[in-house]
Each structure stands twice: as structure tokens, then as C-alpha cells.
Image (spheres, rainbow, N blue to C red):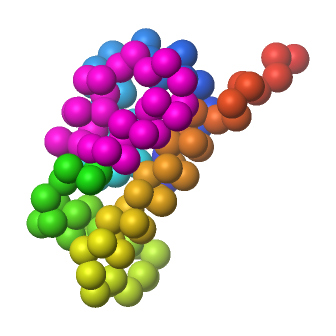
Amino acid sequence: MLTRKGIGLEAFNTLSMRKAEYLLYQCCSSVTWCHSVALQRPYTDRDDLLDYAENELSAMSDQDVDRVFTENTRSRGATVQPHVLARRAEIALMNRRRIEALLGPVDGYPIW
């Protein structure tokens, strides 16, 4: 579960490395992935961030994918996917949804 939602891309780009990695770890529990995605900032748009995050996921070893999948699915009682490609696809979908929740709406929230 994310502790911060809807912070927007601009705010995400300006976070300290430590805070960005912390928030990204809530999306994907791989320290290496979080560091790489945070280090690549600033992102020009949401798609840039989502594409880079997915590419970094593709670069993860099968062992890292197994660990991340197990950690991210244990709490919701999911069954382990038999093939690493299925696990990668599941993690990619979870990451995308969590990053989108972290950033919030594309146009941001209305200012009252």
C-alpha cells in the first residue's frame, strides 16, 4: 500500500533520492530497481517514467523477479505463477498501477 498518492510527476522529480526510492519501493520491492528508476529523474512525462520502470523490470534477474513476485503477492494470497514471464507480466502490471496511483491524475487534482 502506498503511503503517498497523487503527488504528481513534478513533485516526484524534485524529491530527494531517499524519498523517491522509498516511494518507489512501495511500488516494487527491489532496491536495485528503485535506485535505478529514482536515479533516472527528472522524467519528462508519465509515459517516460512508466516506460523506464518497465525496462528496468525487464533487466531484473529471474531470481529478483521471483523474490519481488513472492513479496508482492504474499499478502493477497495469490498463487505463484509457474513461469517467470507470467511473474514479470504480473509485476509490470502491479508497478504500473502503483506508479499511476503515486502520481495521481494526469491533469492533477483540482485546487479548491
Dividing the picture into quadrants, the one containing residue 111 is top right
Residue 7 position (above or below residue 64): above
Residue 49 makes an appearance in the image: yes
Does the magenta portion include 5?
Answer: no
Q: Quarter of the image containing the C terminus?
A: top right
Residue 11 position (above or below residue 101): above
Residue 15 makes an appearance in the image: no
Q: In the image, is 69 to the left or to the right of 98? A: left
Q: Nearer the viewer, residue 14 or 89?
A: 89
Dividing the picture into quadrants, the one containing residue 37 is top left
Q: In the image, is 88 to the left or to the right of 76? A: left
> What percent of the width, then of the height, locates residue 79?
38, 86
Residue farthest toward the right in the current orientation of the protein: 112
Does the magenta portion include 52?
Answer: yes
Residue 102 position (above or below residue 90): above
Q: Nearer the viewer, residue 48 or 112?
A: 48
Which residue is rendered at x = 28% and y = 87% of the image? 82
Q: Which residues are magenta?
A: 31-56
Residue farthest toward the top in the current orientation of the protein: 14
Which residue is rendered at x = 49% and y = 50% of the image? 96
Q: In the image, is 17 to the left or to the right of 60? A: right
Residue 40 position (above or below residue 87): above
